[in-house]
Amino acid sequence: MLAIFHKAFANPPEELNSPASHKSSKKPKLPEETLNEFLSHHPNNSFSMSFGNAAVLAYVPPESPYLVHRRLFCGFDDIYCIFLGSLNNLFMLNKQYGLSKGSNEAMFVIEAYRTLRDRGPYPADQVVKDLDGSFAFVIYDSKTGTVFAALGSDGGVKLYWGIAADGSVVISDDLEVIKEGCAKSFAPFPTGFMFHSEGGLMSFEHPMNKIRAMPRIDSEGVICGANFKVDVYTRVNSIPRVGSETNWIHWDSHE
């Protein structure tokens, strides 16, 4: 999968963007170049959706529908989701959110997002923490221009992100596409974290702790993006909100 969001619609951590990207022999690519390269790797079974200059989503269906880790694409009410992996408690979650038994993980994630966006009954970190399984997902809300992504904490699914030549955010499970498109400005998406285009990056396992960026050094001794870790010794100076005041869109940025 591949998701690219214009810098005006997503605000990734500054540490992800390495100055070395524009000084090395291999320069980052423009979003359309990265998209074309991704599609060329899967010429027979891939498709993409563009949303003007704001975003593009590209998806490759799984070769077999019976794989343990599923790869799903779903769109509903102008909200689009790419989901990787599987949820062990999907049946319970569908029941909790009033969905039919046949709803898949991508359908559930969209419904959970809509509930958080429109009513905010629970903290967003609690909703994501309740997902039991190996998973990664990227949501794009084309009505509001909102980006929401998360990666499970067990490491069963891999996800990477980086910065394109024009400052756009690139997210993919294909490491080679990320390396080619983002040069030195990329890193693994941190496990147990979620990212929101307005709220920033935070740990859904430790939402009251600040986040520390640790520079990544590649084999050439050059800074290559950053790894993000929970600072277990520093807590956020705020009291968790409850009830209807827990509007997940306005979570504090823990960068």
Image (tube, grey):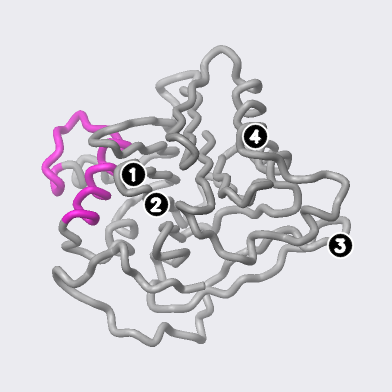
In this figure, which residue is indicated by the disc labeled 4? 34
Which corner quadrant of the image does residue 139 belong to?
A: top left
Read off the residue under disc 2. 148
Percent of width and height locating residue 53:
49, 39
Question: CB under 8 Å between callouts 2 and 1?
Answer: yes
**In the picture shown, does residue 115 fall above or below 41?**
below
* In-front residue for pair 89/197: 197
Residue 178 x %, y %: 66, 42
* Of the image marks 2 and 3, the number of the one nearer the N terminus: 2
Crowding at mark 2 (Cα within 10 Å: few <14, some 14-19, many 20+)? many
- Magenta residues? 95-118
Give the structural element (helix, strand or loop) at label 3.
Answer: loop
* Among numbered discs 2 and 4, the one appearing first in the sequence: 4
Tell me the distance, in whole angstroms, between the alpha carbons under discs 4 and 1.
Answer: 22 Å
Q: Which of the 4 image quadrants contains residue 243?
A: bottom left
Is 112 left or right of 191, judged from the image as shown?
left
- Amino acid type of disc 3? Gly
Pick the residue in front: 86 or 240: 240
Q: Which of the two discs, 4 and 1, labels the residue nearer the N terminus? A: 4
Q: Which residue is mark 1?
A: 141
Counting residues from the start of the chain, the first of labels 1 and 3 encountered is 1
Between 141 and 86, the one nearer to me in the picture: 141
Residue indicated by mark 3: 221
Amino acid bearing label 4: Thr
Q: Secondary structure at mark 1?
A: strand
The residue at 64%/66% (across/down) is: 15
The outermost residue toward the top is: 44
Provide the major secondary structure of the magenta segment. Answer: helix
Q: Residue 166, which numbered label?
A: none
Sooner in the amino-acid sequence: mark 2 or mark 1: 1
User: Where residue 120 appears, x then y in whole percent?
Assistant: 19, 61
